[in-house]
């Protein structure tokens, strides 16, 4: 194999780069292994630049947990309170209380930090103009 890497500036080159990785994937040649690693980094950089990763919302996480465990909205009422509260949380209209977070954590064994809302950034301080004395 030649030592060429595919620089990725568009989706067509991304397809070619992925095909190259697929072709070299099972090779035992040290040069091919190094080439796969380098090409994978180029693919990851392109994907991150064009489709940045974002953390799922709490509502998306809860819906995923419900799907994974085969639970209905009615069954979630025992964890989140009432059917209307389940609906509000899943629509993103209401946040989770500490008690809800504790019950979700106990039921699904997920880390608490996944259930906490993201920290709010403090507003930037404005400089105060002082009058000359």
Image: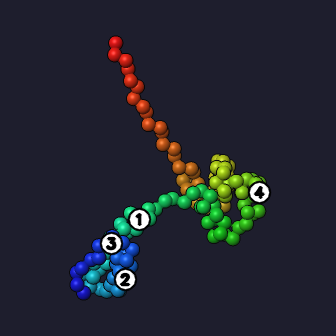
Alpha carbon separation for disc pair 2 and 4 = 48 Å
Within 10 Å of disc 1 (Cα), the crowding (few <14, some 14-19, many 20+) is few
Q: Is residue 17 above or below residue 84?
A: below
- Determine the residue positioned at 43% across, 33% down: 125
Q: Earlier in the sequence, mark 1 or mark 4?
A: 1
Within 10 Å of disc 4 (Cα), the crowding (few <14, some 14-19, many 20+) is some
Secondary structure under badge 3? loop
Location of residue 79 by image quarter: bottom right
Location of residue 18 by image quarter: bottom left
Position of residue 109 in the picture relative to residue 80 (left or right): left
Alpha carbon separation for disc pair 2 and 3 = 13 Å
Residue 73 horizontal/vertical position (percent): 73, 63
- Determine the residue positioned at 35% across, 80% down: 16
Residue 27 horizontal/vertical position (percent): 31, 86
Decide: marks 2, 3 in contact (CB < 8 A)?
Answer: no
Position of residue 49 in the picture relative to residue 95 (left or right): left
Secondary structure under badge 4? helix
Q: Disc number at residue 50?
A: 1
Within 10 Å of disc 2 (Cα), the crowding (few <14, some 14-19, many 20+) is few
Q: Which residue is mark 2?
A: 19
Alpha carbon separation for disc pair 1 and 2 = 19 Å
Rendered-image quadrant of the C terminus: top left
Q: Which residue is mark 4?
A: 83
Q: Which residue is mark 3?
A: 8
């Amino acid at each position: 194999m030649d030592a060429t890497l595919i620089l990725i500036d568009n989706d067509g080159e991304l397809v070619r780069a992925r095909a190259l990785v697929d072709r070299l994937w099972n090779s035992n040649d040290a040069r091919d292994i190094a080439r796969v690693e380098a090409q994978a980094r180029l693919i990851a950089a392109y994907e991150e630049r064009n489709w940045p990763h974002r953390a799922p919302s709490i509502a998306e996480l809860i819906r995923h947990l419900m799907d994974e465990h085969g639970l209905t909205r009615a069954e979630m009422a025992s964890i989140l309170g009432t059917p209307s509260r389940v609906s509000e949380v899943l629509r993103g209209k209401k946040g989770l209380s500490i008690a809800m977070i504790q019950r979700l954590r106990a039921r699904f064994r997920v880390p608490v930090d996944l259930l906490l809302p993201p920290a709010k950034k403090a507003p930037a301080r404005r400089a105060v103009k002082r009058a000359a004395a």
